[in-house]
Structure formats: structure tokens, C-alpha cells
Image (cartoon, rainbow, N blue to C red):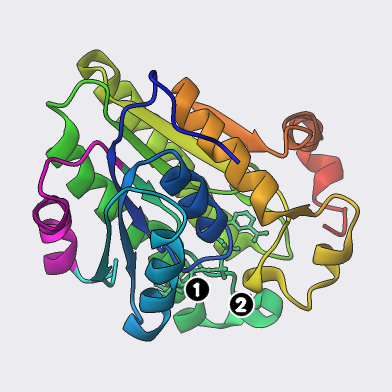
Amino acid sequence: MATASKRDSPRNVILVGATSGIARPLGRRLVARGWNLVVTGRDPARLAPLADDLRVRGNGTIATLVFDPSDAAAVAGLCGAAAALLGGPIDGVIVCHGTLPDESGAWLDVEQTRGAIDANFTSAAMVLAAAAQALENRPGAFLAAISSVAGDRGRQSNYAYGAAKAGLTAYLSGLRNRLHPRGVVVITVKPGIVRTPMTEGLAAARSPLAADADTVARDIERAILRRQAVLYTPWFWWPVMTVICAIPEAIFKRLKL
Ligand SMILES: NC(=O)c1ccc[n+]([C@@H]2O[C@H](COP(=O)([O-])OP(=O)(O)OC[C@H]3O[C@@H](n4cnc5c(N)ncnc54)[C@H](OP(=O)(O)O)[C@@H]3O)[C@@H](O)[C@H]2O)c1
């Protein structure tokens, strides 16, 4: 677990979707660095015990904010509300919420398709837009969001989710391009398969390629500290996805992936 150091002055950070399996160990790591956190989630009953757990793990301020990332008015007020809770401007925003739909019938299901795009792309992009406005004049600030390797190439097993993550990856790329001259780093996190509530019961979670959430959280913490643009986590997903993306479409369309 990381410890606070001189190079690592306390920062005011918003963890959106803090109740997620990946955000939980990430929050613990950031708190151990002495950072101040606003943890958000839609369900106050899940947020309160999370915040209590974080408070005993570090000296920083931990505040909770009940927040639905699909609510445009709440999104517009997010950074102002979080700054008020922490008593100072925000230095970083990490977007961790998302949902993995069962896509076995998705090609027929209009509402499920919209739900997958809204939960994994629209709401995340809205939060990033609001955060970019709040942070664009704060050189040294950072924005991070959890996309997925699923966004690198559409597969029959999860192409609505994958399309949403592809959109998020492209959005982050453009935002990085825009904010780079202002000294604000934008970090795209692309996990592979992670053992969390999202993948519980899925065969993929039993695959040797599946990682535990703390390994992914450690990589995200490092990427934030190093101000890394794109993170594949664990690292081996970069060569795996490079190969998958290189397969010609004439072959790829015949594969059962
Ligand atoms: N697990 C994996 O294998 C994996 C792989 C690649 C990428 N990812 C991505 O990593 C992120 C975290 O995943 P995880 O596995 O940690 O997820 P998780 O444990 O299932 O948690 C997801 C969180 O997202 C929030 N959420 C769920 N549906 C939502 C909706 N419709 N609108 C807004 N918020 C919603 C929930 O928070 P509240 O209900 O408390 O608001 C929940 O705590 C997600 O973006 C996911 O797509 C995960």
C-alpha cells in the first residue's frame, strides 16, 4: 500500500462511482496517500459504510455525495459541490461507474441498447465535460475514467457495452488533446477482465487472464502519479489487444468472441 511522501502533496479528488469493485481499493490507496476524497454513488446506504472504512485508513478528509451521473443538473454542480465539501478546489476527478449488460439478446432490445450506452458512455462523458470545465485552468490537475479493452474492437458477446467504451475512449483521447496545452492530464484506463461484482458468476472471471481489483487499482494509482495517458491493466492486455485489433475483418467476423 502506498504511503504519503514529500512529492505527493494532498490532493482534492472526486471518485465517481466510488462503490464499484475497482474504485473501492483505489479509494483506499488514495486515502493512504493522505489525499482528500469526495466519494459519490447513487445509494446513500452503500456510500456511508464505504466512507467510514476510508476514514480509518488515512488522515485526509472524506466526504460523501449522493450523485447520479445521468442527472445533468447534478453533473453540472458536481465540482462546485465537491469543492465546498472539501473546502478547496478540486485537483482530480476519477470516473469509475459503469454496468455490464447481458447482451445475449441485445441486438433485438432497443431499451437495453440505450441503457448500455447511457450508463457507460453518455453519463461518463457528461461528468468529464463538467470536470474539464472546472479543471481546465488548473495546471497539474488530472481527469481519469475507466473505459475497457472491450472498446478496442467490437465482439458479438458485448458490442453495445464495447461501443459505449469505444465512445468513451475516443472522448478521452479528444479531451486529452484539448487539455494537454493547459497542463491537465487525461488518463484512459483500459482494464481487461477484473473480478468484481460486475463479473461475478461469469465464466470470464474464472479465466487465468482475470485480475483482482486491487491489482487494477494499484495500476490506476501509478498512472495518476506518473500522469500516464493510456493504461492497459494488467499490462498484458496491451499486446493481447494489439493482436486482436490486427486480425483482418474477413477472419474476425467468423470468430466466436
Ligand atoms: N470488472 C471488469 O471486468 C471491468 C473490465 C473493464 C472495465 N470495467 C469498468 O470498470 C468500471 C468499474 O467496474 P466494476 O467492475 O468495479 O463495477 P461494479 O463493481 O459492478 O460497480 C459498478 C458501479 O457503477 C455504478 N452503476 C451501476 N450502474 C449504473 C448506472 N446505470 N448509472 C450510474 N452508475 C451505475 C454502481 O454504483 P452505485 O449503484 O453505488 O451508484 C456500481 O457501484 C466500470 O466502468 C466498468 O465498465 C470493468
Check the image and report above or below for 235 versus 123: above
Q: Nearer the viewer, residue 176 or 65?
A: 65
The quarter holding residue 93 reads: top left
Q: What amino acid is labelled 2 in the image?
A: Ala
Q: Do tag 2 and tag 1 residues touch (Cβ < 8 Å)?
A: yes
Check the image and report above or below for 183 versus 103: above
The quarter holding residue 102 reads: bottom right
> What separation in Å lies between label 2 and label 1 (alpha carbons)?
6 Å
* Label drawn at residue 256: none
Q: Quadrant of the C terminus?
A: bottom right
Position of residue 36 measured from the top left corner of the image (x, y, whole percent): 29, 47
In screen coordinates, is 195 left or right of 186? right
Q: Which residue is mark 2?
A: 106
What kind of secondary structure does the magenta stretch mostly adopt? helix
Q: Is mark 2 within 8 Å of ligand 1?
A: no
Which residue shows up at 73% across the image and 32% down it?
235
Q: Which residue is mark 1?
A: 113
Q: Earlier in the sequence, mark 2 or mark 1?
A: 2
Q: Quadrant of the N terminus?
A: top right
For the question of whether residue 228 can be seen, the reply is: no
In reply to whether residue 157 is colored magenta, the answer given is: no
- Give the residues in magenta: 72-92
Q: Nearer the viewer, residue 140 or 109?
A: 140
Q: Residues within 10 Å of mark 2 (few under 14, many from 20)?
A: some
Position of residue 65 measured from the top left corner of the image (x, y, whole percent): 24, 68
Q: Nearer the viewer, residue 148 or 89?
A: 89
Q: Secondary structure at mark 1?
A: helix
In screen coordinates, is 101 left or right of 104? left
Q: Secondary structure at mark 2?
A: helix
